[in-house]
Image: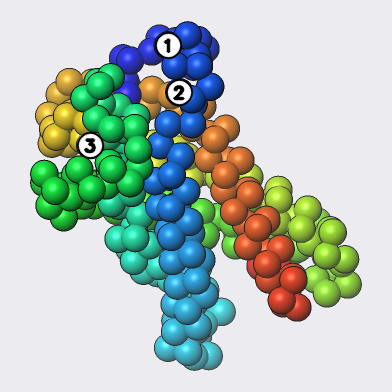
Amino acid sequence: MPGLYSGVGDGFKTINAAEGFKGFTLGWLPTLVGYSAQGFGKFGFYEIFKDVYRNAAGKDEPKYRTVGFAVSSACAEFIADILLCPWEAVKVRMQTAEPGSFTKSGVKGFQTILANEGSAGLYKGIKPLWARQIPYTIVKFVAFEKIVQAFYTNVFTKEKSSYGKGTQMMITFASGYLAGIFCAIVSHPADTCVSIMNKTGQSVGEIYADIGFNGLWKGLGTRIFMIGTLTCLQWVIYDSFKVSMGLQTTGGK
């Protein structure tokens, strides 16, 4: 929330002094449920839509492969955000509400919003969430696929199958982190708007009038570190699962 803390260090000190370790874990349940559902939907539907696009494109698929990555990831994220949005609303409300004005229980928070505001209260952030997550996911998947491809084309130039799983996972790790940096930059302004909107109910225009262009980008450095690490871990977990199932890691020849 812009203006709440003067910086990352100040935020850590303030939360630790006021609430101790519990302050850093507030909202863990809706975060776990929401992002688990979103991740399942995102990666699962991505593979489904990639096959649909590949079959539709036919012999022209290699020519339009980047478009296929973008379309498939956008469609997958559209569905995944429907799974995430209610839990994101609960998490943000728990973390940004004035002390004592909202429950600290994820389950009770969900029930409270549903009882007082109905499903509209849980989904009022869906449009800015799409605005944040769809570009984020397009960048994440397209950048990752292209970076992996670049590694195998320019650095690891032998057939992909000739490299061990350890080397392939190292490439996944590096590609995931680089893709995460791009994701953080693309999604940061919309993420700022979603956080403020869930707390105050303001429109995007009202938020921009209050915080201005610079306010949309506050905290970008922290977000790059967080999203870079998260994106990297997501791809590593995903490719580790594929390897465990006897499949090839993502990307490459």
Q: Position of residue 249 (x, y in %)?
A: 71, 68
- Disc 2 marks a residue whose amino acid type is Gly
- Ranked by sequence position, the earlier of labels 3 and 2 is 2
Amino acid type, mark 1: Ala
Q: Which residue is mark 2?
A: 23
Secondary structure found at label 2 = helix
Label 3: element kind: helix
Say which of marks 3 and 1 sits in front.
1
Up/down of 225 relative to 165, above or below: above
| Three-letter residue code for mark 3 | Asn
- Residue 34 visible from this viewpoint: yes
Left/right placement of residue 192 relative to residue 63 reads left
Q: Residue at x 46, y 39 (%)?
A: 28
Relative placement, left or right, of 39 versus 148 is left
Residue occupying image coordinates x 28% and y 32%: 103
* Neighbour tally class for label 1: few under 14, some 14-19, many 20 plus, Cα within 10 Å: few
Locate residue 188: give its quadrant: top left
Query: Can see residue 120?
Result: no
16 with respect to 172 (left or right): left
Label at residue 198: 3
Instruction: Write the residue at 40% across / 37% down.
Output: 27
Q: Residue at x 34, y 60 (%)?
A: 83
Determine which residue is flagged by label 1: 18
Could you say whether the residue bearing mark 1 is in a helix, strand or loop? helix
Q: From the viewer's perspective, is residue 129 above or below residue 51?
A: above
Q: What x and y, as percent, mark residue 63?
A: 52, 77
Marks 3 and 1, the one that precedes in the sequence: 1
Q: Nearer the viewer, residue 53 or 229?
A: 229
Question: Do residues under tags 2 and 1 come within 8 Å of each other at their CB atoms?
Answer: yes
**Residue 98 appears left or right of 175:** left
